[in-house]
Amino acid sequence: MSLIATDLVPPPMSALVSYLEHDPQPTIVLDTDYNIIAANTAYQRQFGVAGKPHVGAKCYRVCLLYTSDAADEEDSV
């Protein structure tokens, strides 16, 4: 899985998603608070989020299978 984290202003979302779709590996782009700002189709299939809201979610809630208590504790930091 590829992971890209940035605090730079992202390019237009359509350009970013188009770029990610060319990568056959599950790939996500995160902001500096670990929120998913883009994910390619391979990532959506692997983690079962295709057609479900995941953009804006914390990456660890989607792909690392944290317990809800651990995730809530992390969010409060």
Image (cartoon, rainbow, N blue to C red):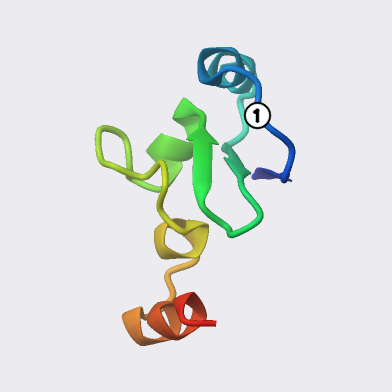
Q: Position of residue 57 (x, y in %)?
A: 40, 53
In the rendered structure, the answer to whether residue 77 lies left or right of residue 75 reads: right
Residue 18 lies, with reference to residue 5, above or below; the image says above
Among the 4 quarters of the image, the one containing residue 12 = top right
**Is residue 15 or residue 63 the one in the foreground?**
15
| Direction left: furthest residue | 51
**Is residue 9 or residue 15 the one in the foreground?**
9
* Quadrant position of the N terminus in the picture: top right
Q: Position of residue 64 (x, y in %)?
A: 50, 66
Which residue shows up at 68% across the image and 32% down it? 9
Query: Where is mark 1, residue-wise?
Result: 10
Which residue shows up at 57% across the image and 37% down it? 26
Which residue shows up at 62% across the image and 48% down it? 31
* Quadrant position of the C terminus in the picture: bottom right
Which residue shows up at 41% across the image and 64% down it? 61
Residue 62 lies, with reference to residue 52, above or below; the image says below
Type of amino acid under label 1: Pro
10 Å crowding of disc 1: few (<14), some (14-19), many (20+): few
Residue 20 lies, with reference to residue 35, above or below; the image says above
Instruction: Check disc 1 and report its element: helix, strand or loop.
Output: loop
Q: Position of residue 10 (x, y in %)?
A: 65, 29
Q: Position of residue 14 (x, y in %)?
A: 51, 14
